[in-house]
Image (tube, rainbow, N blue to C red):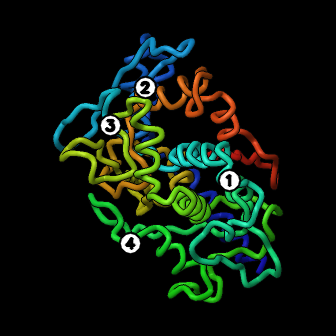
Amino acid sequence: MRRALMVAAALAAALVLLGLALPRQRHVAAHAETFDAFMAQMLEEAAIPGAAIVVVRNGEIIHSAGYGFADVDAHRPMTPDTPINLASVSKPVLGMGLMRLHEEGRLELDVDVNTYLPFRIDNPRLEGEAITLRTLAAHTSGIGDFYDPEEYTLGADAPQALDGYLADLLAPTGARFEAGAHYLKTAPGEARAYSNLGAGVAGAVLESVADETLAAYQQRTLFEPLGMTRTSWRIADYGPHELAVRYRVRQCTPLLPMCADTEQPAWNEIVSRVFDPPRRSSAMRPTLNSAIPTTPTAVERIGARSWRADDGPLERRRTWRRACAYSGKHGGNASPAGWGA
């Protein structure tokens, strides 16, 4: 056993030394003389196809710019008005809808979500547990993380309704319940475990209480009132070549059969930080969209304007702050009640 450990340690040390001897990416962005030069170099160093920024001061946009490409193959430039997939940053947007319903007295944060759902969720490992919106928001609900990229539909909206999809996975009568395979052993509120599936349950609660889809509800109550004309939960609402292409970036170490991509975060971290291969060895290929696409300038509307406005129920400071507030610490990690990414 000791000999095996020594051999493994020697191999690991040899790999590290070899990695140090291999060509590495030059990092010069920090020494750029202008911000535009910094951004251009940073995109190259980090193998990012495109990015857009919006700078807000006192609730007003003072600068916006796009860098790189929204579509690398078509050389379509990125702009501040290019709709970009927000991925998990969509969760605070969902939080805005839930807090609106809460302020209207239509749902409570600390009651069992089965009160609202059209199906029943139940962790077979526990007795008498109550999963609430607050524990869902804090990622302490006891629902495990789950998503399957193979189930995504390329360039189209999901064919199955949200409540049906969740019932299949989480309801004891669901076709894919698998003896509660998607639940954890911890009781709600005990431990933090990031859960996209839990956020989906919160979305189903919103749809049940509002009696309309999440997409329709937030289009009517949030996006349209704020003039967010290029924001929607539905891919079908966007025209051809309107969205920024979402890329999966793969990088390989020179001379070594060692590759990783953005779908392998832990291994990707090792390859990028230990070996730091030149970005010319990186490859980008389109991948599937998920969550809500919107533009950087629209994010300013939902953020800065909602924060400062106090003249209506939609944009009250209290709603935005509660949607992004911290609900406590679990396992050393602060847990945003606003579905923090």
Q: Which residue is mark 1?
A: 137
Q: Earlier in the sequence, mark 2 or mark 4?
A: 2
Give the secondary structure at mark 3: loop
Residue 6: x and y, percent?
A: 72, 70
Which amino acid lies under the numbered mark 3 shown in the image of this protein? Arg
Q: Is residue 33 left or right of residue 238?
A: right
Provide residue 325's location: percent of width, then percent of height: 72, 39
Q: Is residue 17 visible?
A: yes
Query: What residue is shown with label 4?
Result: 160
Q: Quadrant of residue 230?
A: top left
Q: Nearer the viewer, mark 2 or mark 3?
A: 3
As drawn, the label of residue 230 is 3
Q: Residue at x 68, y 66 (%)?
A: 113
Are the residues tagged 1 and 4 within 8 Å (C-beta)? no
Q: Is residue 341 visible?
A: no
- Closer to the eye: label 2 or 1: 1
- In depth, the one of 123 and 277 nearer the eye is 123
How packed mark 4 is, by other alpha carbons closer than 10 Å (few <14, some 14-19, many 20 or more), is few
Q: Secondary structure at mark 1?
A: helix
- Residue for point 77% across, 57% down: 110
